[in-house]
Image (spheres, rainbow, N blue to C red):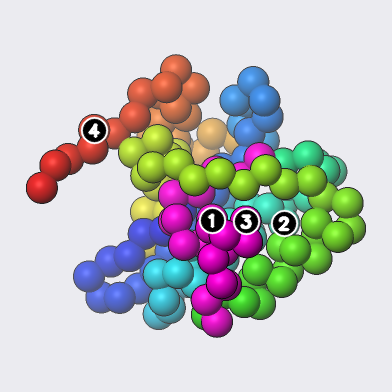
Amino acid sequence: DLSRRFNSRAAGGFIIWDWTRRLIKAGATYYGDTFILVAQARALRDGLRLAIQAGFTNIIIEGDNKIVIHALKGMIHVPWQISNISEDIHTWQTQGIQLIITHIFREANMTADWLSKFGHSITASFSSDMYFSPFLKVILAEDVVGRTLVRRGI
């Protein structure tokens, strides 16, 4: 997921959990000045890279940026800004990594949203296989039971 602050700085976050929703790894990265699309795709690739390094070969990706998700699924032409990232992901697929890529609304992606905001407080990449914050533990527990943010109307 992505967080962008008023000063145009971007940070991304990701969560890796198993099929029982047990935390495997949570991560965040401060990206600095970049396009929203690039930060979203980089956060997805960062999380995917760690999942592959952990030995996972059948991975479900849930992302809330419809352009990134549709580009990776081949539903739209890949925007030039994320073509290298898309190529990295497709290379992993040719090496036997099975991906199911799905779009979810931001409101159902609370943990990754919180981690992307956390990314603004760091200067590099961060990942952990532990609950490094009591807030993270609460948000993960809420995600497990299906609590989502409320979608606001205009």
| Residue that numbered label 2 is attached to | 49
Which amino acid, by three-letter code, is at mark 4?
A: Val
Q: Position of residue 108 (x, y in %)?
A: 40, 35
Few, some or many residues within 10 Å of mark 3 (<14, 14–19, 20+): some
Q: Position of residue 104 (x, y in %)?
A: 45, 41
| Residue that numbered label 4 is attached to | 150
Whichever of callouts 4 and 3 sits on the residue coming sooner in the sequence is 3
| Residue that numbered label 3 is attached to | 73
Q: Is residue 146 visible in this depiction of the protein?
A: yes
Q: Nearer the viewer, residue 75 or 144?
A: 75
Which amino acid, by three-letter code, is at mark 2?
A: Arg
Which residue is at 40% across, 70% downward?
Answer: 36
Closer mark to the observer between disc 4 and disc 3: 3
In three-dimensional space, the C-alpha distance between marks 4 and 1, rounded to whole angstroms, equals: 22 Å
Q: Which portion, as a residue range, is magenta?
A: 60-80
**Image position of 82 with respect to 74: above or below:** below
Q: Residue furthest top?
A: 145
Few, some or many residues within 10 Å of mark 4 (<14, 14–19, 20+): few
Please say if the residues under marks 3 and 1 sit with CB atoms less than 8 Å apart. yes
Q: Nearer the viewer, residue 22 or 67?
A: 67
Say if the magenta span includes residue 15: no
Q: Position of residue 151 (x, y in %)?
A: 23, 37
> Is 78 positioned to the left or the right of 120 in the image?
right
Q: Is residue 26 visible in this depiction of the protein?
A: no
| Residue that numbered label 1 is attached to | 69
